[in-house]
Image (spheres, helix red, strand yellow):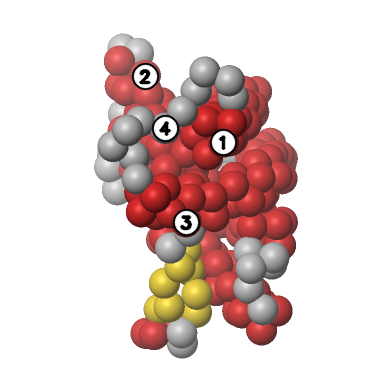
Amino acid sequence: MESRPALVLAIATGLFYTAIVGSIPLSVKVHSFDFLGGILIPTGTILFSFSYLATDVINELRGRSEAFKIVLIGLAMRAFLALITIFSLDGEALNGVSNAVFWNDENEAAFEFVIGSSQLVIVGGIFGFAASSFVDVAIYSYLKKVHEERNMLWLRNNLSTMVAQIVGTVVFVSIAFAYRMPFSAVVPLIIGQILFKCLFAIIDTPLLYFARNIATKRGVFDFSG
């Protein structure tokens, strides 16, 4: 009887960790979406947006405490990844540690361009992730309690995600990109990410309903509750 909700929770948890870790190196690459007016969106932002869907699924099925626990574990994972990244870049400065003989200057330059650029992405990501995730879980939980027994799943999903996205984006971009981009590029980057994330919040609402319906054995297209 518990196999179905357990499976949905496992998928949501896996999606959450994939999103928060995989989005870090992918955030170095920024695309201009011409069909959206030329807004700038890092590839990592697209992947990271799925983390909000994942925490909302966990919050809906298991409650605020479980969602907060997942966020705290994710925060610890990102901090651990930051330490490993520092070692990968500067480990050869330690006694008894050196680069492999086949690792040439060209490899090092390419590696530092991607991984080195992602150091502030990691730092900005930690603070942006912490701020946005806790805001998302807190607002979602509050609205879930206030709107108990009412058909407001769509509202708590969209409102919590949109507010959290705005908070997280401002913090993340300010730390990760402001140092290496002109102000004229940073502002469109912030606006572009916010617009995309708000759009994603609307798009992922049916996915949240589907996940809840599968876990609770409702009709797949039941949009009540």
At 52% from the left and 62% from the top, the residue drawn is 197
Whole-number angstrom distance, CA of label 4 to CA of label 1: 10 Å
Instruction: Identify the residue at horizontal 63%, vertical 73% (top origin).
Output: 181
Task: Name the disc covering residue 6, or none.
Answer: 2
Q: Kindly report the distance in space between the C-alpha atoms of the residues bearing marks 4 and 3.
A: 17 Å
Q: CA distance from mark 2 to mark 4?
A: 44 Å
Of helix, strand and loop, which one carries label 3? helix
Q: Nearer the viewer, mark 4 or mark 1?
A: 4
> Residues under labels 1 and 3: Cα distance?
14 Å
Residue that label 1 marks: 90
Is 115 situated above or below 5?
below
| Three-letter amino acid code of the residue under disc 4 | Asn
Residue picked out by circle 3? 113
104 relative to 134 in the view: left or right: left
N-term-proximal mark, 3 vs 2: 2
**CA separation in Å, label 3 and label 2:** 41 Å
Q: Amino acid at mark 3?
A: Phe
- The reply, left or right, for residue 174 in relation to residue 158 is right
In the rendering, which numbered label is found on residue 99?
4
